[in-house]
Amino acid sequence: MAKRTDTQMRTYPLPLGNDVLYLLLALDRGPRHGYALLREVEAVSGGEVRILTGTLYRRLRRMLDDGLIEEVPAPAGEASADERRRYYAITTFGREVASAEVRRMQGVVRAAAGRLGGRPRTA
């Protein structure tokens, strides 16, 4: 799949899969390599989301192709002897898509709370 052009990056189909959203959230803290992403997703999700290695690299490839993330050089001080190690960072578009997904989810929670008789607390 070819990378999307800037004009194609105006919208992205929502909802995102949980794994994609958690990967974007993990990358919002800075560039990470694959194994670090697996650990960060597990930490951010409180252990609720565990991504298998094969699934991770398929998701990363798709996210790269879709312009949600980009491959970047290793951060300063994180040089690795393993040339195969790749680092990824969230793009501006990826951050916009993650934010849109969070807003969508907040709307679902508000609607569900209203229907189920409870009112969500506002922060």
Image (tube, rainbow, N blue to C red):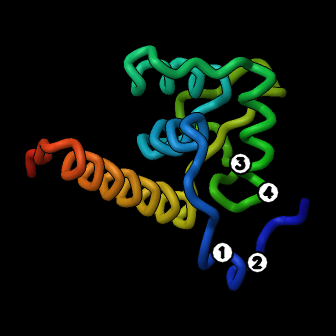
**For mark 1, what is the residue?**
9
Q: Position of residue 55 (x, y in %)?
A: 76, 27
3D distance between C-alphas at marks 3 and 2: 17 Å
| Secondary element at image label 3 | strand
Whole-number angstrom distance, CA of label 1 to CA of label 3 = 18 Å
Tell us which disc is closer to us: 4 or 3.
Answer: 4
**Which residue is the site of mark 4?**
65
In this rendering, would 1 be left or right of 18? Answer: right
Vertical comparison of 22 with 70: above or below:
above
> Of callouts 4 and 3, which one flags the residue occurring earlier in the amino acid sequence?
4
Q: Is residue 36 left or right of residue 56?
A: left
Q: Amino acid at mark 3?
A: Glu
Q: Is residue 28 above or below residue 9?
A: above
Disc 3 marks which residue?
Answer: 71
* Residue most extreme to the top: 47
> Which of 31 and 24 lies nearest the eye of the viewer?
24
